[in-house]
Structures are given as structure tokens and as C-alpha cells.
Image (cartoon, rainbow, N blue to C red):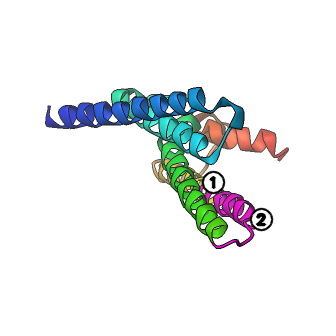
Amino acid sequence: MWQDRIFHALAVLYGIISVVALVKLIRIECRVPEYGWTTQKVFHFLNFLVNGVWYDVFVLRRNVQLVEPEIIQHVLLDMPGLAFFTTYALLVLFWAEIYYQARAMSTDGLRPTFYWINGVVYAIQMILKNSAHEEELTSQVKGWIRSWDNETINVLDVLFNFPDISMELVEGNV
């Protein structure tokens, strides 16, 4: 019961932050629509997105584990953290641009560096998730093999019990 209350409180807080970010975005757009998507507007949009997804995750926390395919679970749980990183890296970019402009320095390298850093972080996350998924599959297969008493294993049994492996075999043309 306490866990449910804590999750509901977190959902409410994330929902409030999300709504505030959306209101700020709309107010800025109404005041200066001629500038398009500025760094400030993108920051508020990402803040709205990140906190909105966290709100959904906490509201639907019990149903998130039931989502199929499993990759969507990972996206729902990892995307807010990655978007949070991008949001606050964008805030650093915003202040770096202000600093560089105040010093009459060129800001040409700041945005490419921002994109590069974000690309590296997202790539690392994808690599780690992929290796963790492979380790989990290997562990499942080993456990299943150990559960058999006889010395022969039918390949069709393996493919039937582990559809991820059969999909890898089909996609990899093995």
C-alpha cells in the first residue's frame, strides 16, 4: 500500500512538472512565434516529454511489466532517462552558447559536440541493453538445458521454448 502511494505521489509530481513545462512552451511560442524552435523551446518540450513519460510509467507501473514485446518495456523504462540526459545536456549547451557569445567566441563547435556526446551516450545504452539481453537469453537456455535429464536435446524443442533464438536464426539466415 505504501509503495502504491509513493508511486502515485511520484506520478502526480511528474505530471505537474510536465504540465508546467507544456504551459511554459505554449507561453513562449505565443510570445515569439517568429523564432521557430529555439533552444529554450526544445528544452521545455523535452522536459514535457520526459516528465510525461515518467508520469505514464508510474501510473501504469504494474502494466509496464506485461507489455509485449519486451523491447517496448525497455524503451518505456530507458527512454525517459536518456531524454533527461539530452534535456539537461541541452541546458548546458544553452549556457555554453551564452557564455561563448558574451566572450565574443565562436559557437560553431558547440552544437556538433552536443550531438556527438548524445550519440555516444545513446549508442552505449543500446550496446549495454543488447549484451544484457543476450546474457539473459544464454542464462535461460543454460537453465533449460540443465533441467533435462537425458543426454539428447531436440533442436525443435529449443526453438519452440525460446522464440527469440528462432527469430535470430531466421533473421541471420543460419
Q: Residue at x 58, y 26 (%)?
A: 30
55 to the left or right of 40: left
Q: Which residues are magenta?
A: 103-125
114 to the left or right of 24: right
The residue type indicated by label 1 comes to Met
Q: Residue at x 14, y 36 (%)?
A: 2
Above or below: residue 3 compared with residue 124 = above
User: Count the marks: how many?
Assistant: 2
Foreground pick, 13 / 172: 13
Looking at the image, do the residues carrying marks 2 and 1 touch, with CB atoms under 8 Å apart? no
The residue type indicated by label 2 comes to Asp
Regarding mark 1 in the picture, which secondary structure is present there? helix
Foreground pick, 170 / 20: 20
Q: Quadrant of residue 66?
A: top left
- Tell me the number on the disc at residue 108: 2
Sequence-wise first label, 2 or 1: 2
Is 116 one of the magenta-colored residues?
yes
Q: Which residue is mark 1?
A: 126
